[in-house]
Amino acid sequence: MRRNPTEPEKRLWRALSNSQLNGLKFRRQHVVFEAQAILDFFCPAIGLGIEVDGDTHEMSRDARRDAKLAALGFKIIRFGNPDVMANLSGVVEVIAATAFTLPNRW
């Protein structure tokens, strides 16, 4: 997935990369070994994970995975592909608002 991201992931990455969002640095396809998970985007400074979901995601499986990540102290927010494609600025606003509520982990 890192070498061949979906179009919604490409668009969101363009908005998050190079510390464009309030100076926060995000990583793509970040591995969390303790939860056996790969996050689409992750900001280590505040422990914020962002998932961009396509049609193949199972809500119950995602909920279990998010619970594991929450137990590790991470906040996960999810957006559907249509949300990113149709309302990228709204998605970025939600990410910024969520990031504002999280304490710095460093």
Image: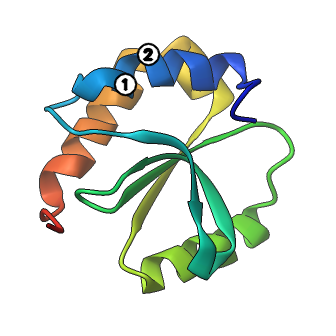
Which residue in the protein does label 1 denote? 17
Q: Which residue is drawn at 48% across and 23% down?
A: 12
* Residue, disc 2: 14
Residue 29, how many percent across, how many down?
Answer: 60, 45
Q: How far apart are marks 1 and 2 (CA)?
A: 6 Å
The relative height of residue 48 versus residue 20 in the rendered view (above or below) is: below
User: Residue 65, image x and y in percent?
Assistant: 65, 73
The kind of residue on which mark 1 rests is: Ser
Q: How crowded is mark 2: few (under 14 residues within 10 Å), some or many (20 or more)?
A: few
Q: Is residue 3 left or right of residue 95?
A: right
Q: Residue at x 71, y 25 (%)?
A: 5
Report the side of 35 relative to 91 (left or right). right
Q: Quadrant of the C terminus?
A: bottom left
Q: Regarding mark 1 in the picture, which secondary structure is present there? A: helix
Height in image: 4 above or below 65? above
Quadrant of the rendered structure where residue 90 is? top left
Q: What residue type is labelled 2?
A: Arg
Q: What element carries label 2?
A: helix
Residue at left offset 36%, top offset 27%: 16
Dot 1 and dot 2 residues touching (CB under 8 Å): yes
Looking at the picture, does residue 52 appear above or below residue 34? above
The extreme bottom residue here reads 71
